[in-house]
Amino acid sequence: MISELREKTGAGLLDVKKALDEAKGNMEEAVTILRKKLGNKIDKLASRATKEGLVHAYIHVGGKVGVLLEVNCETDFVAKNEDFKAFCQDVCLQIAAASPLYVRREEVPEADLAKERDIAAAQMAGKPAAAIQKIVEGKLEKFYSQVCLLDQPFVKDPEGKKTIKDLLTEKVGVMGENMGIRRFTRYQLGA
């Protein structure tokens, strides 16, 4: 039960044991307890500076796609950790497979957003204004999930529900310190 709960929540061993004890062995209740604790911990960690980290290189099978990625953390101890390196590898694989253009939403140029809004609104001609606004916002969300790394569904998640941001949040909880994806470059042969 402990290993299953750790995998589900990304929480540390001691936190998992305490949650299981508190929930008297009820797995669902233990997950709820950990999510509450983990969420508070992550909010506190998010304000701490990330000046260490790793530049990770990945070459996809066949050598036609390559990725350079910078992920930051608080200490060099975490940067040398195998879990941190595995996270960097997973993010590189995501970039190679899904071809994001930006790390986060704030990096998308306003001109691109305006263009996407115009396209979506033109497709909805003749519908009520309130409906158009909701549909346009929905289409913008889809656009973000295609071009922003943190909003993309994680390619290794079989259910397709976990985003890269969710994966990052999970790793912050496991590592116990703030982490952030700073930047990346994706290279494709002939592109």
Image (spheres, helix red, strand yellow):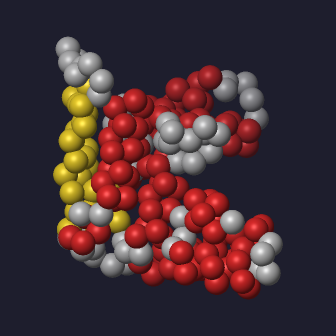
Whether 98 is drawn above or below 30: the answer is above
The structure residue drawn at horizontal position 21% and vertical position 41%, both measured from the top left corner, is 57
Please determine whether, in this image, residue 84 is positioned above or below residue 183: below
- The answer to whether 99 is drawn above or below residue 168 in the figure is above
The quarter of the displayed image where residue 80 is located? bottom left
Question: Which residue is nearer to you in this view: 181 or 25?
Answer: 25
Residue 133 relative to residue 169: left or right = right
Query: What is the residue that sits farthest to the top in this orientation?
Result: 190
Instruction: Tell me the quarter of the image containing the C terminus.
Output: top left
Q: Residue 132 or 102: which is nearer the viewer? A: 102
Can the viewer see residue 112 in this picture?
no
**Position of residue 38 measured from the top left corner of the image (x, y, whole percent):** 56, 75
How many numbered tags mark residues here? 0
Q: Is residue 48 left or right of residue 154?
A: left
Please give the name of the residue rendered at 36% of the width and 71% of the height, measured from the top-left corner. Answer: 178
- Which residue occupies the foreground of this view, 53 or 80? 80
Percent x, y for residue 151? 49, 46
Q: In percent of the image, x 25 and y 64: which residue is there?
A: 79
Q: Is the residue 125 above or below the residue 143 in the image?
A: above
Query: Residue 15: x, y in percent?
Result: 57, 80
Is residue 116 in view from this perspective?
Answer: yes
| Residue 35 located left or right of residue 22 | left
Q: Indicate the position of residue 81 as horizontal and vertical percent values.
A: 30, 63
Q: At 76% from the left edge and 35% from the top edge, which residue is drawn? A: 128
Image quadrant holding the N terminus, namely bottom right
